[in-house]
Image (tube, rainbow, N blue to C red):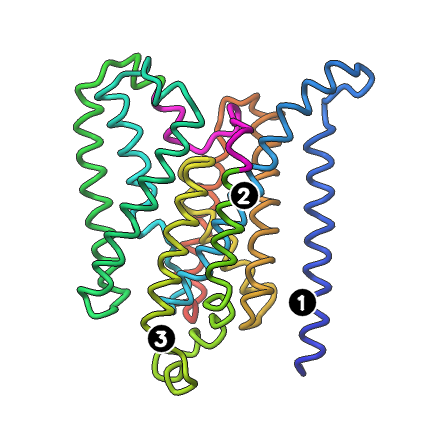
């Protein structure tokens, strides 16, 4: 298949995905929204629109971060969750409740909590992995190994705090440790959007080099790419994207694995511009669909992260068993 034909095919598939997302958005906003009752309809939309925007922000962040990370590592069955951002997030929230209690301003003020989450995960993640990246001779595999160790460390400390925590406070804490869209704070949307736009602008040159980076270190250097510097900046972008996504909706470990690999399977191209848009759109379909199931079928008793984790686990096994060339 020549390049022009492949490009037209991918653009067509992206357009179809966009239409499917648009249909899903309309269904999500209008199903059981009672448009015949204007005040109730307005109230329901005021709850659903912020949730929808947060899902879109999270999908763009997770889709882009996962594809960048997989291209850096040159492995399709890894996710940025291996860097430990989800563990840092859970540890921060648990520590805040353990030390300050559920009555503290940090726990009750969603804007302050979001700012602290984003700042702490961004600074800690960037400093740790930037330093380690330099210390390990720019070896990303060592970074993944250290990230796994740090995840275990944070998880162990968090588990110890939970064991001695008051059961009522743990019950209140649990809601913030899973991806749940029932209590979205709409005021964080603008901040998260600005963060992503600034990040995309700052890393625009490095993002444009992703297609070359995928060819490998030696080939990229031969083509004039400052490989180590580009990888360092892209890793910085991955950490901040995951910080934005996790601080916005909570940990969703398997979502990136699903959407990134499905995008590669559907579009079959090396162009990251197509892959990122496709991954973001498929993430939106997954989260919007999952939220509708949680909302209308299970009446909010089962969080969206449950569906994502089940589907992600099954898909991960599928990649391991039947897609030998994926890693």
Reply yes or no: does residue 170 show up in magenta: no
Name the residue that disc number 2 marks. Answer: 193
Residue neighbourhood size for the residue with mark 3, other residues' Cα within 10 Å, grouped as few (<14), some (14–19), many (≥20): many
Q: Secondary structure at mark 2?
A: helix
Q: Is residue 299 left or right of residue 252?
A: right
* Residue drawn at the location 26% of the way across and 34% of the way down: 91
Q: Secondary structure at mark 1?
A: helix
Is residue 39 or residue 287 the one in the foreground?
A: 39
* Residue drawn at the location 44% of the way across and 25% of the way down: 110
How far apart marks 2 and 1 lie (CA) works out to 27 Å
Residue span colored magenta: 173-190
Q: Secondary structure at mark 3?
A: helix
Q: Is residue 296 above or below residue 130?
A: above
State the image coordinates of residue 308 (x, y, percent, origin top left): 48, 41
* Residue drawn at the location 25% of the way across and 69% of the way down: 138
Please report whichever mark, 1 or 3, sits nearer to the chain's N-terminal start. 1
Q: Quadrant of residue 140?
A: bottom left
Residue neighbourhood size for the residue with mark 1, other residues' Cα within 10 Å, grouped as few (<14), some (14–19), many (≥20): some
Please report whichever mark, 2 or 1, sits nearer to the chain's N-terminal start. 1
State the image coordinates of residue 299 (x, y, percent, origin top left): 57, 21
Residue neighbourhood size for the residue with mark 2, other residues' Cα within 10 Å, grouped as few (<14), some (14–19), many (≥20): some
Q: Is residue 58 above or below residue 295?
A: below
Name the residue that disc number 1 marks. Answer: 10
Residue 194 in view in this figure: yes
């Amino acid at each position: 298949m020549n390049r022009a034909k492949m490009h037209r095919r991918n653009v067509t598939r992206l357009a179809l995905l966009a239409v499917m997302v648009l249909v899903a958005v309309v269904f999500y906003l209008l199903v059981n929204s009672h448009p015949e009752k204007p005040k109730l309809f307005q109230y329901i939309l005021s709850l659903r629109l912020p949730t929808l925007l947060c899902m879109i922000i999270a999908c763009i962040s997770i889709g882009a971060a996962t594809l960048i990370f997989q291209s850096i590592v040159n492995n399709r069955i890894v996710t940025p969750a291996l860097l430990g951002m989800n563990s840092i997030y859970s540890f921060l929230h648990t520590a805040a409740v353990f030390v300050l209690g559920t009555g503290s301003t940090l726990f009750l003020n969603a804007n302050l909590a979001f700012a602290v989450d984003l700042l702490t995960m961004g600074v800690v993640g960037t400093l740790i992995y930037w330093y380690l990246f330099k210390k390990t001779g720019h070896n990303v595999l060592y970074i993944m190994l250290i990230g796994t160790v740090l995840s275990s460390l944070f998880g162990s400390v968090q588990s110890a705090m939970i064991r001695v925590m008051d059961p009522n406070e743990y019950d209140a804490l649990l809601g913030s440790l899973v991806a749940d869209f029932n209590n979205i704070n709409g005021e964080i949307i603008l901040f998260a959007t600005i963060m992503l736009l600034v990040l995309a602008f700052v890393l625009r040159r490095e993002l444009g080099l992703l297609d070359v980076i995928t060819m490998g270190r030696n080939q990229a250097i031969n083509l004039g790419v400052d490989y180590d510097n580009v990888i360092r900046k892209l890793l910085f972008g991955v950490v901040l994207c995951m910080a934005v996504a996790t601080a916005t909706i909570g940990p969703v470990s398997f979502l990136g694995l699903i959407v990134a690999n499905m995008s590669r399977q559907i579009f079959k191209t090396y162009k990251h511009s197509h892959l990122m848009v496709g991954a973001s759109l498929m993430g939106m379909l997954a989260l919007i669909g999952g939220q509708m199931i949680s909302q209308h079928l299970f009446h909010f008793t089962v969080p969206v992260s449950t569906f994502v984790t089940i589907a992600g686990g099954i898909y991960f096994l599928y990649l391991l068993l039947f897609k030998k060339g994926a890693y």
